Amino acid sequence: MKATLTWSHDNSFAIGIRDGIPIALGYIPAAITFGFLSQTTGLTAVESILMSLLVFTGAAQFMALSLLAAGTGSVEIIFTTFILNIRHLLMSASLHEKAAPDRLIRKVIYAFGITDEVFAVTATKEGQVRTGYIFGVSVIAYMSWVIHTGVGYAVGGFLPDVLQQSLTFALYALFIALLAPSMKKHRKVLVLAAFAAVLNSMFSLFMADGWSIILATILSASLVELVEPSYQKQRKGGET
């Protein structure tokens, strides 16, 4: 039996596109913000769009703009970007366990499109996730990010200052909206998210953002997994 799945004969890609529409819509203000901020930083339109095409991670791109504005060298920017995005290793490994078997080249391609929001949608979907579905979610999100980066660069500084400042919170609001349904279904997810947030806030005071997120995630997940069996056992004992 072949391990390769062909997704051209089902509607998993279309379903992924549908489920990815909220991400695409949420990326619009953030991408527009990145576009006109990159213009003020001194990047050309081609450079701004290429960054979105090749990097495709909002946090790292905004960070790169601030480092460029401060005159930081390319080596430091690349290293900082790696540290900030090291969490993607955990997300990709987690999604690999949930995803249906497929060719390595397809996994490599869709791994590029795994962002925080794409991971939240695919990882919380019930059952095994097919390749077509992952492609659908990531493609619609990727297109929105790249296209609206160009739009943001084109509009430049025409938006009011108040609106420009409010757009920077779009990614955080989007991720919370994606995480909320899972929190309602599973109490463990709520405890994990809250504990990880507290730890990350503490660690970020003396650690780089990337490492603080990784350490907070590992510690909170480990603690929840250690405590939950005892909690479930006590709960069952109380019911009997």
Image (spheres, helix red, strand yellow):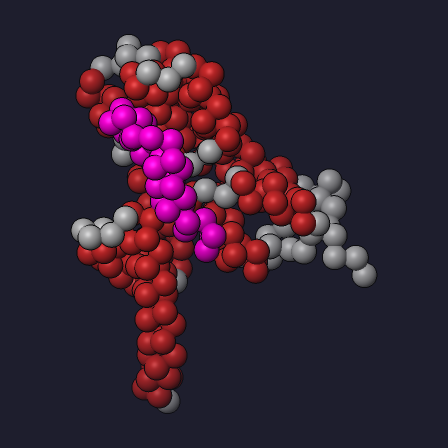
146 shown above or below 121? above
In the rendered image, residue 39 lying in the magenta stretch gets the answer no
Frontmost residue, 180 versus 149: 149
Drawn side of residue 171 relative to residue 125, left or right: left
Q: Position of residue 186 (x, y in %)?
A: 39, 62
- Tell me: residue 37, above or below residue 138: above
Occupied quadrant, residue 59: top left
Residue drawn at x 24%, y 52% as measured from the top left: 207
Q: Quadrant of the N terminus?
A: bottom right
Query: Which residues, given as a range, are shown in magenta?
Result: 62-91
Quadrant of the rendering where the C terminus is positioned: bottom left
Residue 27: percent from left, percent from top: 40, 31
Camera-side residue: 32 or 57?
57
Q: Residue at x 55, y 45 (%)?
A: 111
Q: Is residue 35 left or right of residue 69?
A: right
Q: Nearer the viewer, residue 163 or 81?
A: 81
Q: Above or below — where is 11 with respect to 197?
A: above
Q: Magenta-highlighted stretch: main secondary structure?
A: helix
Q: Residue at x 46, y 55 (%)?
A: 90
Q: In the visual, does 158 lie left or right of 120?
A: left
Q: Is residue 8 visible?
A: yes
Residue 79: in magenta span: yes
Q: Residue at coordinates 51% horizontally, 52% vertically from top-left? A: 92
